[in-house]
Amino acid sequence: MDLGNLEKVLAGEPAFRLGQAKQAVFRDLIEDWQEATVLPLSLREKLSKDIPLKVVAEISVSKDKKTIKALINLKDDLKIEAVLMRHQDRNTVCLSSMVGCPLACEFCATGKIGFKRNLTIAEIINQVLLFNRYLKKENQRVNSIVFMGMGEPFLNYDNVLGAIRVLNDQDYFNIGARHISISTVGIIDGVEKLAKESLQVNLAISLHAANDSLRSEIMPINKNQSLGEVLKSVENYFKTTRRKVMFEYIMIAGINDSLKNARELTGLLAGLKSTAFMVNLISYNPTGIFKASTPKQIKDFKSVLEKSGIEVTQRYRFGQTIKAACGQLAADKT
Ligand code: SF4
């Protein structure tokens, strides 16, 4: 759904037609303009021709029905993935911001396919539209967003922020900013720009290592911007926004999960105000190279952090059976 196009096509019509069209697409969740009977037939035909509503996707559902993965076909035949995760009253969609990703993190399936291109605002919001249509039969809606799918959101900053404004807008998706999270490797320019936006979205930084040499090994972007620089930008972000930042840490067996690594992490974060951040430990979802840490290792690691006064959470595991878990999105057929 290209909103710019919608306004263009309806430019010669009475002003209320735009409102009716938005209501049909975003509230009534029509999949074909012919369903919008409030609009004259000639206009429905014009809209069908100029602004197709269909989102072409292959849907896979996990056995427990809590994870739904969509493999979405784009106009140029490239493919992306988006995932709906259902947990209690939350319908969270993990969005992609790129086709592939240029950052080549060692543990990530998306990084292995390289970078194809950035997604447009329309391609980003279509992922949510698709799942709103999926949830319509249960009278439910997507009410939470995480930019944690394919791609680095801050390397597609303008389109990601443009999409967030549409997702947050009452006339469109009406998803509260506090229920929208951006997960980044810590692109400093992006962190600085986000701090200046008047948006209450959440920021998560993928840390995954507590020293530069290990982080550069598993996340090549670290060779261009050190951990110290990333932490400095987080400190400034907190000073400006007073919003707590989440540090994501994927637990990979034998790589970054020892007690020495845990102590190193507490040392690294010691310079930050304890109210400025929390740490989220994530069980690694194997993509072929590394192994996941054992539950005991994660528990011991967590306890080292907690003993030093750090607030720690552990992410619920979604979607491994359909390769929809964190770091597993690769749109096999891209
Ligand atoms: S983890 Fe994120 S930034 Fe790294 S390669 Fe994968 S998608 Fe890109």
Image: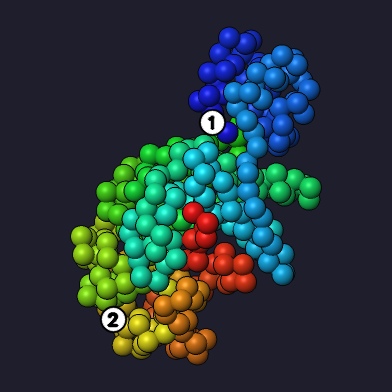
Quarter that holds the N terminus: top right
Q: Amino acid at mark 1?
A: Asp
Q: Amino acid at mark 2?
A: Glu
Give the residue at x 72% y 64%.
65
Give the residue at x 58% y 49%.
72
Residue 144 or residue 158, whichever sits in front = 158
Residue 273 can be seen in this image = yes
Q: Position of residue 104 (x, y in %)?
A: 34, 63
Give the residue at x 64% y 33%.
53
Q: For this view, does 61 lie left or right of residue 320?
A: right
- The crowding category of the residue bearing disc 1, from other C-alpha atoms within 10 Å (few below 14, some 14 to 19, many at least 20), is some
Q: Position of residue 303 (x, y in %)?
A: 44, 85
Q: For this view, does 226 lie left or right of residue 288?
A: left
State how many labels appear. Answer: 2
Q: For this view, does 53 lie left or right of residue 297?
A: right
Secondary structure beneath dot 1 equals loop
Q: Which residue matches tag 2?
A: 264
| Among numbered discs 1 and 2, the one appearing first in the sequence | 1
Q: Position of residue 327 (x, y in %)?
A: 47, 66
Q: Which mark is residue 332?
A: none
Give the residue at x 33% y 59%.
103
- CA gap between label 1 and label 2 equals 47 Å
Q: Which residue matches tag 1?
A: 2
Marks 1 and 2 close (CB-CB < 8 Å): no
- The crowding category of the residue bearing disc 2, from other C-alpha atoms within 10 Å (few below 14, some 14 to 19, many at least 20), is some
Which image quadrant for residue 243?
bottom left
